[in-house]
Amino acid sequence: MAYLKRLFIGSPMETKRLKHEKLPKWKALAVFSSDALSSVAYATEEILLVLMILGTSVFFYSLPIALAIVGLLVIVTLSYRQIIYAFPSGGGAYVVARDHINTTTSLVAGAALMIDYVLTVAVSISSAVAALTSAFPALLTWKVEIAVALVLLLMILNLRGITESATVFAYPTYLFIISVLVLIIAGGWKLYNEGWHGFNYANHATPEHFFTSGYGVFILLRAFSSGCSAMTGVEAISNGVPSFRPNSSKNAAITMGWMSLLLGIMFLGITILSAGFGVTPAEHKTVISQIGSHVFGNSILFYIFQMITMLILVLAANTSFAGFPQLVSIIATDRYLPRSLAARGDRLVFSNGIILLSILAIILIIVFHGKTHSLIPLYAVGVFLSFTIGQYGMIKKIWKEKSKSNMATLSIIITGTIATGLVTIITVIAKFTHGAWLVIVAIPLIVVLFNKIHAHYETLAQQLKLDKSDRTETKEIVTPKVIIPISGISKVVDQSVQYAKSISDDITAITIVFAEEEEQKIRDKWYKLYPDIELKIIYSPYRTILSPLLDYINKVEKETKGATITILMPQFIVKKWWHTLLHNQTAIFLRFFLILKKDIVIATLPYHLKE
């Protein structure tokens, strides 16, 4: 097992190497921005899928919707750059709310971000498989299995360490950026030469026709909220500031600026091309693959573009593998999640957080059968809720400081808070019946879980706290009563008996027999070897072992009236792991049932076999 771990994950790293596991800006862009950048592969399609309810005559309105989303992206970027400078320890909206709003709000932000990160993995991987099956339809029947395998591959790569995984992911990310920019330039040149032959304002629905009913406005808002999936992952950089090289805040802010600029250009370009070529959503063919087909034809370039798109969508999930473990480690440090999530593993990454994220994403992929369109309605609620909370926390922070130099920043953040707050409300209303209700229900449940975990740690701390008044000197040493469960008489049992004699004079061995004739044989053999130690033999006519053992121990416990009882379990340790499968595991089950008893000490005395 240890060999396999080293093979897949690598050798352990010393703690002092942590300072070298920091990312330069060009690698950080690949690690923390791949989610946001890759969303151009499906965000435009999500807008068109909603507008299609009213028919292709309204597809031209995907352009003003895209412009509105890019404007929102600019506002959120400017706001979150301030969060990066104000909170260099990372944690984003969770830490901002914790320090400047209140605990409950911070937990809501933490829950929303956690859900968003899990959905990012599920959506990105499912979209990657959709891109693959668009080029190779024969793989459709295996899409769930392929998606699960890709999640496991990402998990292993991230368990190897942040620097190593960043190097692997950097080049495909830049290859995708270049390929999309080439697609936009080539597609724009083709439209310039051939003319706009897709959806346009002059030949399609007029604003008066579009806004004649409240239903049309509702569809427009719903399309806008679906397109806002392009902004998922924008907050990841603010959560992972500590992963940047010094000066970490400055480097993170610069990287966020690069990311937003690239995202805006790519998203707007793809939307313009889809309108210019008249692309409509089709089953088993993504919008971006149809644009690629228009620009590159059925040439090798089209298939290369599809493979690059699939690759970046897989790597987009890596944003979550960078952000989720960092976030849950902060929440765990605050004692609202298990402490194990705050510990770094062999390769100086938060291994338990990486594994937890992988498991949750795989469950989502299996439950939703790897369908991107089923997962995306769950997506934007948590993102924009955390945007709103984070920015509101920054407003309170700046307001407390009351510095005139911060007034311009304050106005930007207030604008961002109002905008993302409205988007949150629109998303909840527009997507409520399409799955958003699941997130709305899940967030309070996770917050309740946070509080339950915190209450447990608080109670535990109170009970384990040692004051001088709590210390009592033992006036009299009372030897414990020792019970040794045995299945026969052997070297293992003899070792246990000798040890029991060294700690107590009150020793009882107990065995369970299935046939009455066995009783006298074992009794004679026992007292011949250990005449001074009592042997309790219980006949079990229904061949059960645990029930008679537990009944006897419970009876002794009542008779001793609170005195300590030691259950000393002889156990031989086999040389090879699979040999364990050849033996009964009664000791393990007995330990499981007895561990919660207050006055019982469970001890295992191992006997190591030579072969």
Image: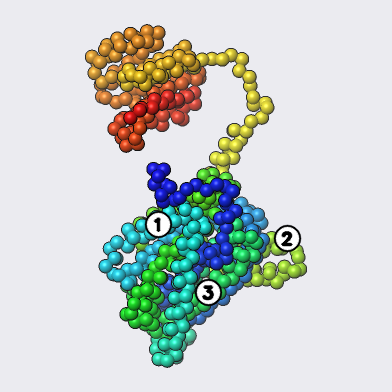
Identify the element where label 1 is drawn.
helix
Which of the marked residues, 3 or 2, is nearer the chain's N terminus?
Answer: 3
Q: Amino acid under label 1? A: Leu
Which of the marked residues, 1 or 3, is nearer the chain's N terminus?
Answer: 1
Residue to which mark 3 is pinned:
262
Query: Which of 452 and 214 lies nearest the eye of the viewer?
Result: 452
Residue to which mark 1 is pinned:
153
Query: Which of 382 and 23 lies nearest the eye of the viewer?
Result: 23
Cα–Cα span, label 1 and label 2: 47 Å
Residue to which mark 2 is pinned:
400
Residue 167 is situated, as x and y percent measured from the top left of the image, at 49, 62
Q: At 69% across and 60% down in the image, what residue appears?
A: 397
Residue 431 is situated, as x and y percent measured from the top left of the image, at 45, 66
Query: Which of 229 and 436 lies nearest the eye of the viewer?
Result: 229
Quadrant (top left/top right/bottom left/bottom right) for the N terminus: top left
Q: Amino acid under label 3? A: Leu
Left or right of 570, for residue 322: right
- Is disc 3 surrounded by few (<14), some (14 to 19) or many (20+) residues within 10 Å? some
Quadrant assignment, res 585: top left
Q: At 40% across and 8% down in the image, what residue appears?
A: 532
Q: Are marks 1 and 3 in contact (CB under 8 Å)?
A: no
* Number of marks drawn: 3
Of the numbered discs in the image, which one, if any, rests on residue 242? Answer: none
Q: Disc 3 vs disc 2: which is toward the camera?
A: 3
Cα–Cα span, label 3 and label 2: 35 Å
Residue 223 is situated, as x and y percent measured from the top left of the image, at 46, 74
Q: How is the image coloured?
A: rainbow
Q: At 42% across and 81% down in the image, what residue appears?
A: 274
Q: Disc 1 vs disc 3: which is toward the camera?
A: 1
Which of the marked residues, 1 or 2, is nearer the chain's N terminus?
Answer: 1
Identify the element where label 2 is drawn.
helix
